[in-house]
Image: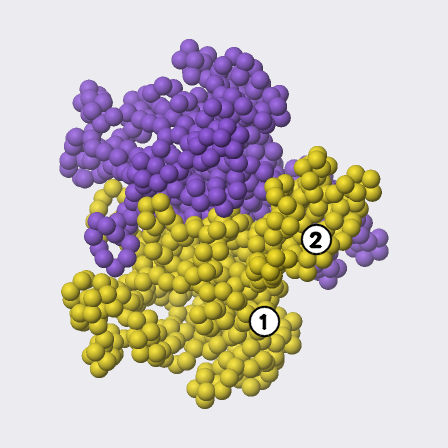
Chain colours: A yellow, B purple
Amino acid sequence: MAKISIDDMAGFCKKKGFIFPNSEIYGGMAGFFDYGHLGSELKKNIKDSWWKYHVQDREDVIGIDGTIITHPKVWVASGHVESFLDIMLECTKCGEKIRADTFIEEKLKIAADGIKADAINSLIDDNNLVCPKCSSDFKKAEDFNLMFEIQVGPKKDSESMAYLRPETAQLMFTDFKLVYDSARAKLPFGIAQMGRAFRNEISPRNFLFRCREFEQMEIEYFIHPDKVQECPYIKEMLDYEFLVYSASMQDNKKPAGMMKLKDALKNKIIKTKWHAYWLSVEHKWFCDLGVNPKNLRIRQHLKEEKSHYALDTWDLEYNFPFGWKELQGMANRTDFDLRQHIKHSKKDLSIFDQETNKKVIPYVVAEPSLGVDRSFLVFMFDAYTTRKDEKGNEVVVLKLNPKIAPVKVGVFPLVNKLEEKAREVFDLLKKEFTCIFDRSGSIGRRYARADESGIPYCVTIDFDTLNDKQVTIRDRDTAKQKRVKIEELIGELKKLI
Amino acid sequence: MAKISIDDMAGFCKKKGFIFPNSEIYGGMAGFFDYGHLGSELKKNIKDSWWKYHVQDREDVIGIDGTIITHPKVWVASGHVESFLDIMLECTKCGEKIRADTFIEEKLKIAADGIKADAINSLIDDNNLVCPKCSSDFKKAEDFNLMFEIQVGPKKDSESMAYLRPETAQLMFTDFKLVYDSARAKLPFGIAQMGRAFRNEISPRNFLFRCREFEQMEIEYFIHPDKVQECPYIKEMLDYEFLVYSASMQDNKKPAGMMKLKDALKNKIIKTKWHAYWLSVEHKWFCDLGVNPKNLRIRQHLKEEKSHYALDTWDLEYNFPFGWKELQGMANRTDFDLRQHIKHSKKDLSIFDQETNKKVIPYVVAEPSLGVDRSFLVFMFDAYTTRKDEKGNEVVVLKLNPKIAPVKVGVFPLVNKLEEKAREVFDLLKKEFTCIFDRSGSIGRRYARADESGIPYCVTIDFDTLNDKQVTIRDRDTAKQKRVKIEELIGELKKLI
């Protein structure tokens, strides 16, 4: 479990070059963050790993990469124009505007996610809640659409109005037929996309957790509507085990429990094989990249939480310092989205199923949808540890999995005299791994800096190297050292990384 | 040279799943395109290759990944609010709005890039130019700022107004000090960024060439202001040769000529070593990925073309079917941007130079700045070839360099009976390469489809495979075939790719 608060994590990320507040020299912008030299590499590794696992390594998932500014009708059809709302409270006196549900949750310690404006107004009245800034009364709560509007082209009128996408997902539906035809796809198959999305949050909070600009990695997985229980891949995952927190456990105040996938299916806790399959696949992605399974759970949405389109929704959650929070929602969206786009575009988006000789509108049985920035936070919190150095000071060791670590190897000459030899080793390694060369400060200082940066292995060149052609590999997590021949160094490191 | 028009290329890209018009089912949006299953992989390979070549393989360039929505003061300081303009013509009768410079260029066959509104009005009057749609007169030409405005947060007022970044570049300046400190950088060094940028073009045109939403790969390269001629890397590139088109060649109507970098420097055609170095490095990136050097040239900006901040600017250009066009501009920006941000933010962005013991404001000596989408077009046009098939029909062979080809290997069973064996080979290869499995249609059809998709190597499993454990590798570019043992297949393909 992470031993650091979210604010301290933000400070650590800034100091080490993982994350900076955007436009800081101009006072910053709430809800916008830039990734620094280590952060941009870690983020890229997370995205590359997601794409490889979900798209390149699978025959049944294909990728797209669409635009951020999208046609307004897309969001009318999807329901976002009507329903993608938060409820806003505005102070009658100072004009402060805050998000109602999180305000209510903080003040009254009750769950308020998805609560309507009327209910908010009653709670405000019943509990005499006032503006946190100036203690005056609020106006009546009102709906606030979270989509950013934009005018496209030189004519400023209602016809030129478009939106920044609030999710990457809808493009998989609007491009569905084009993708299906050009990729010669066959059911079941998924369409994946990574990219930025934007939500005009009333009060962005918790560092990277709730930003106005963020990045998503999403799949819409399409199946034949009659084949919800026919998942050809389920066998691979039946013995997979994870922490499960069903709606009935929550209703009956029972704790979440470790459960095998096959038992969750047998006991009808997870209703469809496809849904169960994708939940386990998504859980496994995090664990394969080093996240402690004890910090992850799958939680079923309660009746009142469910989205307007979904038959059944589960969240993959992580145990953040500020509580268990959603990483991704996975909904069985049925044919809701495709039908909406058929209705609004008047285009035929059904496909011809060769096996049954019928035209069908596929079901989206699962929508693995993950925030890149939230994943980034998960990997950072899960990797963050401290140890005492020789002087008794607490120092940070960032135990990022070598697969996603921004820098794989640090190369250090023990003293500056050895720089030439160390450069030779560096030049050898940099063809294979992302490396840094560091000659500044004592070797202990350099190890400590490498530990803070999450560099899994350091290679040190000392005076013996000149004679025995061996170097020392130091392991970040154990601080153990090992002598290796230079000629065997690449092979040795490849085994480790 | 490409044998296809830009419109036919757009059609080919749509059919094969490289590029779709965005929101096509809703009538589309001019200047917005989505990348399909092959396009998204090709684009990812281009970006990954750029990042590896420019950031990961270099010690002196570090990456960032910042936000798209940015603080308005950033763009005041950069000069974009005042100067990032196109001139717009509006019809008095039908209200049609068009971009003046390209309209003038088309009608009068003169260069009009950067021309001012007054000059446009004179040209319109002198040549009796009228609306291309309804032949009525234009209103007076007026400036149109190309930045998209956006309201951030729940308060809609002038203070909440921000911009979508029109380039990724400014974030390297606003984050300069944070990056410098956290990465412990030393001059000379560069800050690199890839990502979306947005320009509200009056008339988007030429498919991917001029879009409203596009992607950039940019570096700001900082040096000590006194060391413009001290480039430690220049030696590596002195014998590099490229097609050079200087301002004086253009002024004197002389043709561009092949020239070695050292000669361009000796003859003071390129003024600074740093600038020369980066021009050659950028040129080489394209050529390393298979682009024919005859289709690339570096062209110096004429006096009247130069940006407000630049001492000397060169464009890297490609010979598109619609003429030589800019791929990237490379300007010596001096300390213009950092000084602007110092002035507007009132923050000290100077750094302490250890060598000279002085505080300095670094110079940006070169700004390698490249459009991902334009690069995508370059690789497509350069790779696009045709050949006659057995029946005499013209078929497309997309000769993409294996390093960036979206799919590296196609695996085909000669007949369906051999599918099991072919699957074994596929499972073996897919751990190492992006592969597709195709069992549909004659083997000739499958080869043709692979050629159109730019798949460099196809592996076919035939009846002999069952006995001799060998398969056939077919080379896309020569259509030559070769038998290889399955156990040697991965090694053989690795050599080729």
Tag 1, which secondary structure? helix
Image location (x, y in percent) of residue B217: 47, 40
Quarter assignment of residue B94 = top left
Residue B83 visible in this rendered orientation of the protein: yes
Q: Residue at x 70, y 35 (%)?
A: A417
Q: Chain of mark 1?
A: A
Residues packed near mark 1 inside 10 Å, few (<14), some (14 to 19) or many (20 plus): some
Which residue in the structure is indicated by mark 1?
A: A293
Q: Chain of mark 2?
A: A
How many marks on residues? Answer: 2
Q: Residue at x 26, y 49 (%)?
A: B161
- Relative depth, front residue between A235 and A123: A123
Q: Residue at x 45, y 36 (%)?
A: B351
Nearer mark to the viewer, of 2 and 1: 2
Q: Name which of mark 2 and mark 1 comes first in the sequence.
A: 1
Residue A289 as seen in the image, left or right of residue B333: right
- Relative depth, front residue between B437 and A36: A36
* Quadrant of the snapshot with the C terminus of chain A: bottom right
Q: Residue at x 59, y 69 (%)?
A: A292
* Quadrant of the snapshot with the N terminus of chain A: bottom right
Which residue in the structure is indicated by mark 2?
A: A474
Quarter assignment of residue B83 = top left
Tag 2, which secondary structure? strand
Residue A70 as seen in the image, left or right of residue A397: left
Residues packed near mark 2 inside 10 Å, few (<14), some (14 to 19) or many (20 plus): many
Image location (x, y in percent) of residue B296: 52, 27
Q: Marks 2 and 1, Cα distance to the nearest angstrom?
A: 27 Å
- Relative depth, front residue between B63 and A83: B63
Where A424 sits versus A13, above or below? above
- Relative depth, front residue between A387 and B431: A387
